[in-house]
């Protein structure tokens, strides 16, 4: 093996394997090959899974381009942006893709390529770039053609030799495998993101409640994880708020989250229990069904009697399964952490452990913030410090709209980017003695919810 071949194979393997982003991999690949094997090059990918024979030029995209001469790079990028649309069915690119074998033009490449280009900008740009020789090498991985690499040399260099063509085959095979893995990762991530998007449904916003939600996956994960938020109504009309975090950051954690979320919703709606009872039943169901789950979870419920509505207050009842405490910003902008009178163990850890509710009264105009530990805890910052930082951030941004407040929190509080998933659920209790404010958007309720919020839960907390 020549020094050039060994060096290129090592560089391609190491540098391309360091990223799962196709665009980044393409940029690295083209720069590795220029000027080692060509004066300039263009990398093409096929962006569909259909057979090539019917329409070999359909779904092609020139994803990377590079020139050894910095002054020519803008020209090459423009050529790459225009050439696919200008290619005819007799192009060298089509021949290489269909045959799975390299196509080489050893001399007179400019005229030969212009002969298979439609008249226009791409042909004119090629004339200015003036390649003398070209090789179009297909990228094949696992028996499937992913795209092709076009290598161009000017008149100052001879065409690729047989030995260099052999090196090119090995290099493109290694690169194709990396690009194939990146493509599979991208497709898996898209499926996972769609899965998670459907699970993290739009929250209800009854009466004068405004609800804002955010989800940010860990950077290391397949953009899904076990963190989730939820807001729904019980048949009585009470609003239930949920924030949870299944141990783990991958698709398996997301699948477990989906089970817990669905079971919790069903339990809350069918039983109309309060938060502690909901957690108790969920933990029992996890044990009975032998679901290998471990999760922190906080369930809260907003309740209001007719007298409380007249007084401009709402009761918050909540119970925690090892989850960080809620924070509340009062109408004046002062933030506080709500005390936990009886935080229970994680879901899946001790199903027989008793669970209790905590309760407080919130002034209308207050903002409630529920979150997962990815927001406030990291390797460099303990949980308690993170909660203090969150409280400071909430006070600093208290005058903002709820949506802007959530964005501000996400941009300023996390100590480390991408270390853990983050789920965030903010609730603003707008005043009820005036119309729902425009910033809160339209009201969203359950179809069978009682029309009058004052009749939904009595002073004794009926239904829980």
Image: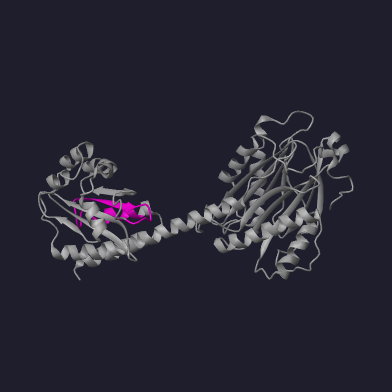
In which quarter of the view is residue 139 placed? bottom left
Q: Position of residue 80 (x, y in %)?
A: 27, 44
Instruction: Decide which of 397, 344 is in the foreground and name it.
Output: 344
Q: Is residue 19 visible?
A: no
User: Is residue 448 shown above or below 181?
Assistant: above
Count every numbered label the image shows and give the total.
0
- Residue range in magenta is 25-51
Q: Residue furthest front?
A: 54
Indicate whether 33 appears above or below 440: below
Q: Nearer the viewer, residue 363 or 304?
A: 304
The quadrant of the picture occupied by the N terminus is: bottom left
Q: Is residue 112 left or right of residue 10?
A: left
Residue 130 lies, with reference to residue 268, above or below; the image says: above
Image colouring? one colour
Q: Quadrant of residue 167?
A: bottom left
Q: Write the residue at 67% across / 40% down.
A: 395
Q: Nearer the viewer, residue 240 or 363?
A: 240
Residue 171, image x, y percentages: 26, 63
Task: Give coordinates of residue 13: x percent, y percent.
Answer: 32, 64
Image coords of residue 337 (percent x, y): 73, 48
Q: Vertical placement of 219 versus 441: above or below?
A: below
In reply to whether residue 225 is colored magenta, the answer given is no
Magenta stretch holds residue 36 = yes
């Amino acid at each position: 093996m020549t020094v050039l071949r060994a060096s290129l194979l090592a560089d391609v393997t190491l540098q391309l394997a360091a990223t799962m982003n196709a665009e980044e991999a393409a940029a690295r690949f083209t720069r590795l090959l220029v000027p080692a094997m060509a004066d300039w090059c263009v990398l093409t990918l096929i962006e569909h899974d259909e057979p090539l024979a019917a329409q070999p030029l359909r779904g092609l995209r020139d994803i990377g381009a590079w020139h050894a001469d910095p002054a020519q790079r803008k020209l090459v990028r423009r050529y790459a942006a225009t050439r696919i649309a200008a290619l005819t069915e007799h192009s060298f690119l089509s021949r290489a893709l269909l045959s799975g074998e390299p196509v080489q033009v050893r001399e007179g490449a400019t005229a030969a390529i212009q002969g298979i280009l439609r008249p226009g900008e791409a042909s004119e740009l090629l004339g200015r770039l003036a390649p003398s020789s070209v090789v179009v090498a297909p990228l094949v991985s696992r028996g499937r053609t992913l795209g092709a690499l076009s290598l161009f040399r000017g008149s100052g260099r001879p065409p690729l030799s047989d030995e260099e063509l052999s090196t090119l085959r090995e290099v493109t095979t290694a690169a194709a495998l990396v690009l194939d893995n990146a493509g599979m990762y991208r497709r898996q991530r898209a499926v996972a993101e769609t899965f998670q998007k459907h699970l993290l449904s739009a929250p209800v916003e009854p009466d004068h409640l405004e609800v804002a939600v955010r989800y940010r996956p860990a950077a290391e994960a397949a953009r899904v994880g076990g963190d989730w938020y939820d807001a729904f109504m019980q048949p009585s009309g009470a609003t239930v708020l949920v924030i949870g975090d299944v141990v783990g950051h991958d698709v398996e954690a997301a699948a477990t989250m989906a089970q817990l979320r669905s079971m919790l919703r069903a339990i809350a709606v069918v039983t109309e229990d309060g938060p502690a009872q909901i957690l108790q039943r969920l933990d029992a169901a996890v044990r009975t069904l032998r679901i290998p789950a471990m999760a922190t979870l906080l369930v809260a419920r907003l309740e209001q009697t007719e007298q409380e509505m007249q007084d401009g207050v709402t009761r918050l009842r909540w119970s925690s399964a090892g989850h960080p405490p809620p924070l509340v910003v009062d109408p004046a902008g002062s933030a506080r952490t709500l005390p936990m009178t009886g935080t229970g163990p994680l879901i899946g850890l001790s199903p027989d452990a008793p669970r209790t509710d905590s309760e407080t009264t919130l002034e209308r105009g207050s903002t409630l913030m529920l979150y997962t530990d990815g927001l406030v805890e990291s390797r460099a910052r303990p949980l308690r410090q993170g909660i203090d930082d969150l409280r400071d951030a909430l006070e600093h941004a208290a005058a903002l709209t709820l949506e802007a407040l959530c964005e501000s929190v996400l941009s300023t509080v996390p100590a480390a980017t991408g270390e853990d998933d983050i789920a965030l659920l903010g609730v603003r209790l707008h005043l009820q003695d005036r119309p729902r404010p425009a910033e809160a958007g339209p009201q969203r309720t359950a179809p069978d919810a009682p029309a009058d919020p004052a009749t939904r839960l009595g002073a004794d907390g009926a239904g829980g």
